[in-house]
Structure formats: structure tokens, C-alpha cells
Amino acid sequence: MQALNFEAHGELDVLQFGEVPDPEVPDGWALLKVEACALNHLDIWVRRGWPGLKLDMPHIGGSDIAGTLVTDTGNWKAGDTVVVDPGISTRQDAWTTRGDDSLSPGYRILGEHVRGGFAEFVAVPIENLHPRPTGLTAAEAAAPLLVGLTAYRMLVHRARLQTGERMLVVGSGGGVNSTAIQLGCHFGAEVHVVAGGPEKAQRAKELGAALV
């Protein structure tokens, strides 16, 4: 298959587009034909690397994936359109039992620790599949996945945001920030935003911020 990949960490010049082996599909996983994979700042960090990050090369980034199932898998049928939860739990422990999967030593993220969606095909756990929302294109469905999970965890699991509370979002141009504004409004909070310029301030207002 064709994929955007790299064989060593570095800047943009390490990226290459070409043939790589098709994904292996273990038991309990599914093969997807990728229709859209959103860009995330995580892709830059992974490409550059950091001490302790060990990847099987060539590595394929891309965490935010929407696609179509290639074959019948579990209760899913070939041709089903899906989005993928990018967080993979590889073990059950005290963290996963209480819903803090991302704190478990066995937690992995598609495109970071395992090969992701910047390719024609990707293998993902069946339990990470979700139906693509009706009315959304593949690109629209892929865009909010990882940033949405991040913002949701911060506001709901950590901050325990309640209706009527005030919340402050510092910066409004990034994916997590933009999503946090919308989630805060959805849960009935009064959202205040610090924006870095008139264009970002206007966008924050359009997303529902009460004070910018």
C-alpha cells in the first residue's frame, strides 16, 4: 500500500511517500480503507521524536481516522463507514477499571505508538470502531477525534465541569482549545477565552464564547 512514512526521526525532510507492507490484522482487530485522516500537532512531535520513544520503522503517523471496513468483522460489515477511537488499551489494570485508560502503562495511541492512518489502509482494534455520524463527510468526522477526547477528558473527567460554572480557555486557535469552547457551551458553562488576535477572538465568539 501507499503511505506517508519516515524511517528516522527528524524534520520534514525525513518524510517520504511510497510503498510499505500492508498492515497485519491480529485477532480482534479490523482492516480499514482510510478515507480521511486529520493532521494533529502530535504528528510533528512523533516525527521529531523524544528520549524513550521507540517505534517500529518505517513509522506511519495519523491518529484521527475515518474510513470504510474492508471485510466483515465481528458485528461490522464490509463497507460500513466508521470513525476510530485513537486510544488503544492493551491491558486491563486498576487504571482501566476506573476509566483512566490513558494513565495505564498499556495505553497506546494510533499514529504515536503504533502505525496510524496516513496510509491507504490501517489495522485497528474492533472495540475502537464507532459508526460515522450521519451527515458528516469522512474529513469532517475525522477532524475532532483526538482533540475531542483530550478536551472531554480535561473538562468532564478532570474538572467535573457543571452547568452554570465559568471556565477559562487560554488560547483559541488550536484544536483542543476550539473543541473545549464548544464542549463548555454544550455543558452549559459560561466560557471565557483569551485569544491571540482579532481573528482568533472572532472565531472564539462564533464558537460560543461568552467573553473574549
Image (spheres, rainbow, N blue to C red):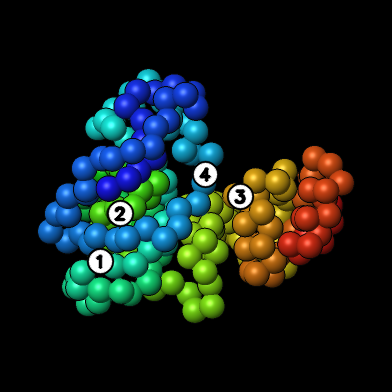
Marks 1 and 4, the one that precedes in the sequence: 4
Marks 2 and 3, the one that precedes in the sequence: 2
Marks 3 and 4, the one that precedes in the sequence: 4
Mark nearest the camera among 3 and 1 is 1
Residue sitting at 34 percent across and 67 percent down? 68
Residue sitting at 37 percent across and 72 percent down? 81
Marks 3 and 1, the one that precedes in the sequence: 1
Q: Which mark is residue 121?
A: 2
Alpha carbon separation for disc pair 4 and 2: 19 Å
Q: Which residue is mark 3?
A: 175
The residue type indicated by label 3 comes to: Gly
Marks 4 and 2, the one that precedes in the sequence: 4
Residue 33 in the image, given as x and y percentages of width and height:
32, 60
Marks 2 and 1, the one that precedes in the sequence: 1
Q: Is residue 201 left or right of residue 131?
A: right
Q: Which mark is residue 40?
A: 4
Alpha carbon separation for disc pair 3 and 4: 8 Å
Disc tally is 4
Alpha carbon separation for disc pair 3 and 1: 30 Å
- Which quadrant would residue 97 be assigned to in this image? bottom left
Mark nearest the camera among 2 and 3 is 2
Q: Residues within 10 Å of mark 3 (few under 14, many from 20)?
A: some
Question: Do the residues under discs 2 and 1 have CB atoms within 8 angstroms?
Answer: yes
Residue sitting at 21 percent across and 42 percent down? 21
Q: Is residue 29 left or right of residue 54?
A: left
Q: Residues within 10 Å of mark 1 (few under 14, many from 20)?
A: some
Q: Secondary structure at mark 3?
A: helix
Q: Is residue 108 left or right of residue 171?
A: left
